Amino acid sequence: MNVAQKAAVSAIHWYQREISSRTSATCKYYPTCSMYADTAVKRFGFVRGIILAALRLMRCRPWSRGGIDDVPQVFSLFYRFSWSSAHEEPSVEPQYYTRDTTFTHTES
């Protein structure tokens, strides 16, 4: 990880520890927006990760349905659109996110 990634991940962890942990859970999505941002920055680097995190925050609005919204495996701004070559179908079963590892997927 470069310096920008480390700073972003540290800021996200600070937010999770100091702010998010002291408020009631209200996130409509899994993983939460902060875990999504953490994973995106670790997976794609600072600039691309922040872009994906910002797009995720813009999707979080009162009339959105929420649900499972995993970080894409391949970077693309259009991975949510069926016409994109990087399209990924929404998961029925979520990937499991932890603070120390980016993700672990268990096969059933």
Image (tube, rainbow, N blue to C red):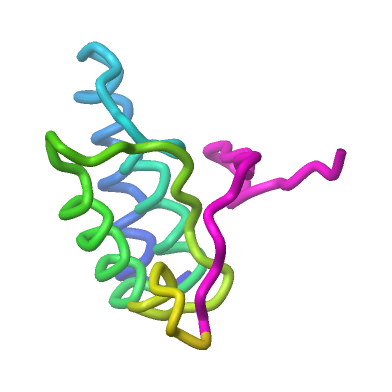
Please say if 35 is above or below 102: above
Q: Is 61 displayed left or right of 53 in the figure?
A: left
Question: What residue is drawn where x is 47% and y is 55%?
Answer: 39
**87 magenta-colored:** yes
Q: Is 100 displayed left or right of 5 in the figure?
A: right
Q: Is 9 displayed left or right of 68 in the figure?
A: left
Closest to the observer, 33 or 45: 33
**85 magenta-colored:** no
The residue lying furthest to the bottom in this view is 85
Point out residue 50 in the picture as x, y percentages from the top left corner: 27, 66
Closest to the observer, 8 or 49: 49
Point out residue 4 in the picture as x, y percentages from the top left corner: 30, 70
Point out residue 33 in the picture as x, y percentages from the top left corner: 32, 43
Q: Is 75 displayed left or right of 64 in the figure?
A: right
Give the prevailing secondary structure in the magenta stretch.
loop
Please say if 19 is above or below 76: above
Question: What residue is drawn where x is 33% and y is 48%?
Answer: 10
Point out residue 18 in the picture as x, y percentages from the top left corner: 23, 24
The residue lying furthest to the left in this view is 62
Closest to the observer, 102 or 88: 88
Question: What residue is drawn where x is 25% and y is 70%?
Answer: 51
The residue lying furthest to the front in this view is 83
- Quadrant in which the C terminus is drawn: top right
Please say if 55 is above or below 48: above
Magenta region: which residues? 86-108
Please say if 68 is above or below 77: above
Q: Quadrant of residue 106?
A: top right
Q: Quadrant of residue 98?
A: top right
